[in-house]
Amino acid sequence: MIDLSRYFLVLFMNQSISKQEFRAFVDDFLKKLAIQNTGGLYNEMLNSTIAAYETFFGTINNLDVKAAIQKSRTASMNLVMQAFITSVQSSGLVIEGLFKNKPELEEFFPLGRNEFNQATLENVETLMKRLATSTATHRTKVGDAIAKEFEVYPDLFKEARGVQLTEIARVSDIRQEAKDARLELATLMTKNVLQIAMNNIGNPDAAKLFFNQSLLEDKGISAVEDTPPTPPSVS
């Protein structure tokens, strides 16, 4: 029995097909289509596919760039956290010595300095604000140097964290755009397959003139560069 429903599926959305494989396949298709476009029969198909191709892989490139930026912003935020913990490890010893056996010490380290060594993304800003406040309150005792050292951390972290969250949101948005763009290109390529098949009913060998299915397999794809090839133009 022939399963006619298979012709209603959107092809090329299988997760086993990587974006590199899909890129190589579509690029090869565009070149073959340009060769077979005698008399301008496939002008509209070429134009629409090139547009969808550039949208998808342009979005992918943008996603890669934004992901790299996000990684950099996260690293910057982590550096602020680590610098704060290092300050606590060094200047915290001085503070402990100044307030040893005094109740004021709890304003700085109610759970001991080890609490700061175990700081997390969720509580580090609170810890920074606590030391900024307590060192400011006892500036005369701890000295200007230590007070100034800790007063900068809340704003530094807030700024670094804010920038990181902004980049995370941007990456999330672009990732969704990439998914939508891939579906659009996959749907269009499915229509192309069906249209070309309609133009060549009874001649299955014609498929080789337009499509190289081996490019959708894992073998040999490592040779495909990440930079998208320039698709052929339509005269």
Image: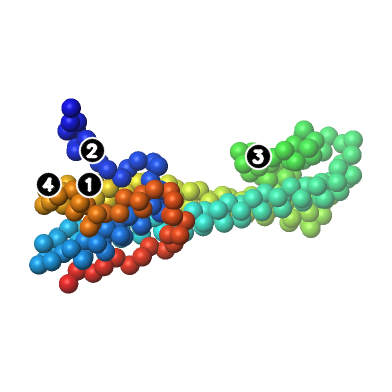
Per the model, the C-alpha gap separating discs 3 and 1 is 48 Å
Q: Nearer the viewer, mark 4 or mark 1?
A: 4
Q: Quadrant of the N terminus?
A: top left
Q: Amino acid at mark 3?
A: Thr
127 in relation to 38, above or below:
above
Callout 4 touching callout 1 (CB < 8 Å): no
Per the model, the C-alpha gap separating discs 3 and 4 is 66 Å
Expressed as whole percent of the image width and height from the top left, the position of residue 167 reads 48, 52
Q: Is residue 163 visible?
A: no
User: Is the residue marked by circle 3 packed among few (<14), some (14-19), or many (20+) residues within 10 Å?
Assistant: few
114 in relation to 162, above or below:
above
Expressed as whole percent of the image width and height from the top left, the position of residue 201 reads 11, 47
Q: Amino acid at mark 1?
A: Thr
Q: Nearer the viewer, mark 4 or mark 2?
A: 4
Dot 3: element: loop
Expressed as whole percent of the image width and height from the top left, the position of residue 196 reads 16, 52
Dot 2: element: loop
Callout 4 touching callout 2 (CB < 8 Å): no
Specify the quadrant of the image occupied by residue 227.
Answer: bottom left
Q: Is residue 189 visible?
A: yes
**Chain-order first, disc 3 or disc 1:** 3
The disc at residue 202 is 4
Q: Amino acid at mark 2?
A: Leu
Q: Which residue is mark 3?
A: 120
Per the model, the C-alpha gap separating discs 4 and 1 is 19 Å
**Chain-order first, disc 4 or disc 2:** 2
Per the model, the C-alpha gap separating discs 4 and 2 is 21 Å
User: Is the residue marked by circle 2 packed among few (<14), some (14-19), or many (20+) residues within 10 Å?
Assistant: few
Per the model, the C-alpha gap separating discs 1 and 2 is 8 Å
The disc at residue 190 is 1
